[in-house]
Image (cartoon, rainbow, N blue to C red):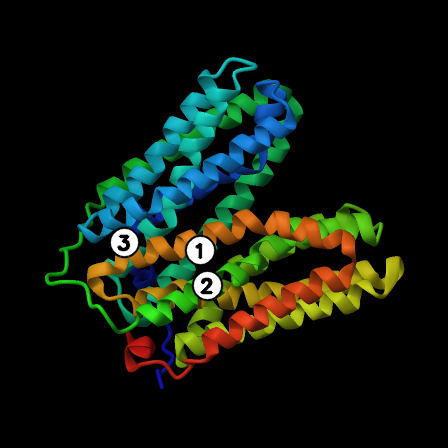
Amino acid sequence: MVTTTKIQPHVLVRASGGPRYAVALAVDALGTGLLRPFLLLYGVTVLRLSAPATGIAMTAGIVVGLACLPAVGRWLDRGARSTAVAASMLVRVLGVALLLATPAGHGWLFATAALFLGIGNQAWPAAHAALVATVAHGRERDAALAAARALRNAGLGAGALLATACLAGGTTAVRVLAAGTGLAYLVAAALAWSVRIRARPAAGPAPAEGPAPRMRALLAANVSYVFCLNVPEIALPLVLVTQLHASPVWPAAIFVANTVLVVTLQVPVTVLLSRFARRTVLALAGVVLAASYLGFLAATSLGSGWGAPAVAAVSVVCTIGEVVYAGSATALVTALAPARVLGRALARFQFSTGFGLAVSPAVITALAPHGPAALWGSLAGATLLSTTAVATDSQGRPSERAR
């Protein structure tokens, strides 16, 4: 059993890549928060594209970004670290520059911009996790990954709030937001590149046996787990507004509470659960998430009177499950993957995450019209099946516990 130790802030910063890299993460997250929720709005209001055309372009960007992940994984396995992180930021600078240069009505240029933004957004998580795995080890690495997620959520929330406040300025303000995003990405890329971290490629052939079967099970399970990230943004607003006829204030308040809880709880919960094997913690996350989905099912049965407050209360349980999941999933991948194929393993994990995030809106919106039982029962069942797959090898190997 691993003994839980208190991780000092300076140790956490060092394990995250150093002060300059931490600033780069914060600036990058702030820039993403400025534009990400309003990219659709940019296409519709500034470029005067139809909503369907804008949505298709954004989806295509995500899909092509996922298709680039195998190349990113191979690059990481050749030793790239801070350069790969900086590249993921610079390619988004190019995407923003294309947005600003696109004349009204030119959908193909908007699609190209969305493509570069999608590539950068999909490449960043694997590159960042590989960099942290190079400078930190064991539970310090897990805490550093958790700290980066908390910092990123804080930056995304701050950026989104700032962007919302600026929207009263109309299309000019939206263009300024896009320019601010590009500048933030450029500053973040310069800071990330300046830390000059590179890994020495591991010698010898990649192992033919070992963790590969378990990795495949983990990646498949992750597709179901990752649905929890879209519950506050898609499922709960859909249920609260269209089924319970609640005020839009409820989903907005739940989203804010989710962000605050993730920022404040991600590191302490990850450190607290470090006494257990990572696979066990990931299975626990599945149980908590499935329980929250069943809680949503019960809450919606209360009707429009008590339904909204009950959904808000259950959302706290769902957020805790999200925190436990996020603190253990990437950490387990870095512990399972042999050093020689760490980059490819992280790229495959990001592919499963990106795929789950891409399909979850369609799945959620397809299930919701069939009633609460179809939506929440299906999510709970799929998550429990994934939890069973993860828990099958819950004892794991010693390397899963201590690495």
Label 2 amino acid? Ala
Mark 3 Cα shell of 10 Å, populated few (<14), some (14-19), many (≥20): many
Residue type, mark 1 in image = Ser
| Crowd band around label 1 with a 10 angstrom C-alpha radius: few (<14), some (14–19), many (20+) | many
Badge nearest the viewer, 2 or 3: 2
Asked which quadrant contains residue 123, the reply is top left
Task: List the residue tagged with mark 1.
Answer: 352
Residue 288 lies, in percent from the top left, at 59, 72
Quarter of the image where the C terminus is located: bottom left
Q: Which residue is mark 2?
A: 220
Residue 219 shows up from this direction: yes
- Give how far across and how far down residue 71 sits, in percent: 28, 44
The residue under label 3 is 131
Q: Quick one: SS at disc 1? A: helix
* Element on which disc 2 rests: helix
| Three-letter code, disc 3 | Leu
Residue occupying the point 41% across, 59% down: 147
Image coords of residue 14 (percent x, y): 28, 58
Q: CA distance from mark 1 to mark 3?
A: 20 Å
